[in-house]
Image (cartoon, rainbow, N blue to C red):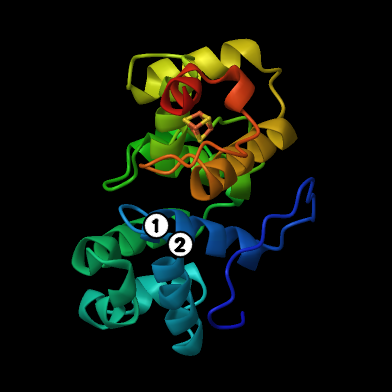
Amino acid sequence: MRKNKAPVYRPGFRGRLSARQRDEICMGAILTQNTNWGNVERSLVELHRAGLWDWAAIAATPARKLERWIRSSGYFRQKAKKLKIFARYALGRSPARWFSRADLLALWGIGPETADSMLLYAGAKNAFVIDAYTLRIGKRLGWFNHQSYEGAQKFLTSYLPGSTRLYAEFHAVIVELAKRHCRVKPSCPGCPLLELCPHGQKILS
Ligand code: SF4
């Protein structure tokens, strides 16, 4: 992995994942809790440099040492503990066995967003990821007023065909929209959804 290279959005990317890529996605899903991806990427680079690139190495490394490499992601004590719990869980299980939502949610530190990110992007399962961006954009577009994870997920999946590829693409597009236009303070001119968005139209009227 090259340092300081921002993740690139590749529409329709369907590459086959190696076991190592799946592990990286799961590590990233834990590390990205409450922080941005740039900070996570710095931690992944540090883990890589330290040779902590598989669950066996993570499980065998004392938490105090692990914390040093993931400092950039914030909440590093909690996240080191979460990585170690996940490592112990994943070790000895095939991905087919550990990509179970109920199992993931039973682990300390794994909530619905983290579990669904792992299931969708690493496990290629039909799990629609809801994040703060989805809630913000959905509310502004008038898709839903409620802010609960399950409510938003139920709403969106009731309109979309169950497709791993579509769910992954949809979430990626939401993230891009939130970064380019629908920020906390939205930049509505030029937003591709302006015609459909009561919030944006109100701002620009
Ligand atoms: S028009 Fe404005 S508020 Fe609506 S989705 Fe676009 S950026 Fe967000």
18 sits left or right of 103 in the view: right
7 sits left or right of 69 in the view: right
Image point (55%, 49%), residue name: 180
Q: Where is residue 49 in the image (x, y as percent from the top left)?
A: 49, 89
Residue 204, relative to residue 121: is it above or below? above
User: Which sits in the foreground, 30 or 184?
Assistant: 184
Circle 2 SS class: helix
Q: Where is residue 44 in the image (x, y as percent from the top left)?
A: 47, 74
Question: What residue did someone put label 1 on?
Answer: 32
User: Which sits in the foreground, 6 or 21?
Assistant: 6
Tell me if label 2 and label 1 are in contact, CB under 8 Å.
yes
14 sits left or right of 157 in the view: right
Classify 10 Å Cα crowding around label 1: few (below 14), some (14-19), many (20 and above).
many
Please identify, in this view, whether the residue under mark 2 or under mark 1 is nearer the observer.
2
39 sits left or right of 200 in the view: left
Amino acid beneath label 1: Thr
Question: What residue did someone put label 2 on?
Answer: 37
Residue 101, relative to residue 178: is it above or below? above
Q: Find the distance from the CA under tag 2 to the CA under tag 1.
A: 6 Å
Classify 10 Å Cα crowding around label 2: few (below 14), some (14-19), many (20 and above).
some
Residue found farthest to the front? 205
Image point (47%, 28%), residue name: 204
Q: Where is residue 37 in the image (x, y as percent from the top left)?
A: 45, 62
Circle 1 SS class: loop
Amino acid beneath label 2: Trp
Tell me, yes or no, if residue 98 can be seen here: no
Tell me, yes or no, if residue 141 can be seen here: yes
